[in-house]
Image: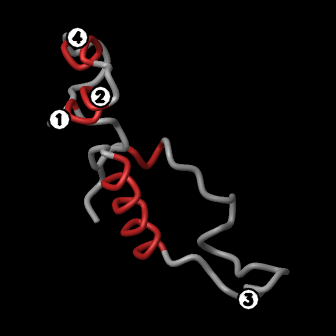
Amino acid sequence: MAKTGAEKWMFLPRDGLKNPLSKGPLKGAKLDRTKYDVMLQRYYKKRGWDERGIPTKTTLKRLGLEDIAKQPKKRVKLFN
């Protein structure tokens, strides 16, 4: 998966990709980075966010936040 810049915002357990879980019903299981990335993108889409995890203009308008969607790019460029 291409780097989007959102990686620095998404936090996994410190050793979540390296070490298997040590307890619980999934003991011994490891997090698969590819599956995690796919799940994360599906979550973003379901929420109405872009691939970076930022709400789209359409989502902001749907939530009644048109004024934010119309603001000039102060910190980040919004996508439709």
Query: Does label 1 or label 3 sit earlier along the sequence?
Result: 3
Q: Which mark is residue 28?
A: 3
Are dots 1 and 2 in contact, CB under 8 Å? no
Q: Is residue 66 above or below residue 46?
A: above
In the rendered structure, are the residues bearing label 1 and label 3 in contact, judged by CB atoms less than 8 Å apart?
no
Tell me the CA gap for discs 2 and 3. Answer: 41 Å
User: Which one is earlier in the sequence, the residue at label 4 or at label 1?
Assistant: 4
Secondary structure under the numbered disc 3 in the rendered image: loop
Which residue is depicted at the point 21% across and 26% down?
A: 77
- Name the amino acid, label 3: Gly
Q: Nearer the viewer, residue 33 or 49?
A: 49
Q: Amino acid at mark 2?
A: Leu
User: Which amino acid does the dot numbered 4 rest on?
Assistant: Gln
Where is residue 50, by image quadrant?
top left
Name the residue: 40% across, 74% down: 34
In this figure, which colouring scheme has been used for the structure? secondary structure
Q: Comparing marks 2 and 3, which lies closer to the viewer? A: 2
**Separation of disc 3 and disc 4 at Cα?**
48 Å
Q: Nearer the viewer, mark 4 or mark 2?
A: 2
- Density class for disc 1 (Cα within 10 Å; few <14, some 14-19, many ≥20) is few
Residue type indicated by callout 1:
Phe
Quadrant for the C terminus, please. top left
Q: Earlier in the sequence, mark 1 or mark 2?
A: 2
Spatial CA distance of label 1 from label 2 is: 11 Å
Tell me the residue that label 2 is attached to: 60
Q: Dot 1 corresponds to which residue?
A: 79
Q: In this rendering, which labeled residue sits more in front, label 1 or label 3?
A: 1
Query: Which residue position holds label 4?
Result: 71
